[in-house]
Amino acid sequence: MLHLLTPAVLALIVAAAPALAQDPLSPAKDHYVAAEYEKALGALDEARKAAGIAPATLLAVEQYRALCLLALGRKVEAERAIEAVLDLDPFYVPGEDEAAPWVQAAFRDVRRRVLPATLQQRYGRGKQAFERKEYAAADQAFADVLRILSDPDLALDEAAKSDMRLVVQGFLDLSKATRAVPPSSPLPEVASVPSAPRPEAASPSAASKAASGSEQVPAQASESGSPVYDSTAQDVLPPVPLRQSVVIPEQARPREEVTGVVEIVIDTRGFIESVIVRQSFGPALDRLVLQSVKDWRYRAGERAGNPVRYRRLVRIVLPSR
């Protein structure tokens, strides 16, 4: 018999399925233990058709399918089955004391290939939940993203990992801050973040400046339909700040330090095309911050040598008086 997993691990997989009077995995398990892998696959196909199959049972079914196909040497099908396992649980890897080395290697090879796509999928799932204001679901998806970013099997440039960590942490901070604001207080506009900007740091200043409450700066008409990039676009050089300070009159500065977040779009000239408060500084301060941000200037982002529009989140800390 070709042993793929230890008896203890087989017991764990079976235990993952609900303990029902008629365990849908029992026939497949019996065939697997007897090394009747083709029959086990047939039984697993039947188990998958069960109405209302529990996620834990489905995961066990896909794990058994992968093991049977590996035992039969059907590599392409086995890889697809492993992909199905990882779609349900991207963190599943047979341990060294649980599976034969070649089984572990098969899972790790597939994980290395699919984890970058899984990362983007979980990130997209979190962003969509965030935009729907389903913050608990967003937090879970973003937590998965952070965990994947720390996974040794993720083949991704360290700089890209660092950028995405900043982006995700920014969303988590916004989620926490939004839920911390009492319902009667004005909330920052957070429901329409269209892509993944990178949090940056802006330097505050205490010099005087005229104030205006406008949130939008007119863009060139020719740019209205052009794409907007952000830190997740690996083939784009981000804008370089030339002037990025927040100017608040001394008498208007807060009694205590205040932190907020703005979302900006930088046009192809390096000007601020639009600015929106994503985490409020307070009604009066928002107006002053917006006026200062509209005066920021950058060397425009570039893609293939051409200037592009670029979106980013900027965290701003306003010092106390």
Image: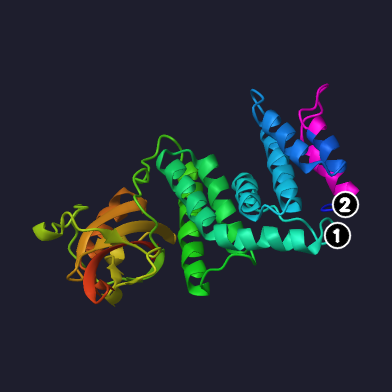
Residue 76 vs residue 227, the one in the foreground: 76
Residue 97 is marked as 1
Proximity of marks 2 and 1: CB atoms separated by less than 8 Å: yes
Q: On the image, which quarter does residue 53 sit in?
A: top right
Residue 184 vs residue 253, the one in the foreground: 184
Task: Kindly identify the amino acid type of the residue bearing the numbered disc 2.
Answer: Thr
Query: Mark 1: few, some, or many residues within 10 Å (few <14, many ≥20)?
Result: few
Q: Secondary structure at mark 1?
A: loop
What percent of the width, then of the height, locates residue 31?
Answer: 83, 37
**Disc 2 and disc 1: Cα gap in Å?**
8 Å
In the image: residue 307, left or right of residue 198: left
Residue 15 falls inside the magenta stretch: yes
What percent of the width, then of the height, locates residue 321?
Answer: 38, 65
What percent of the width, then of the height, locates residue 178?
Answer: 45, 45
Q: Which residues are magenta?
A: 7-27
Residue 6 is marked as 2
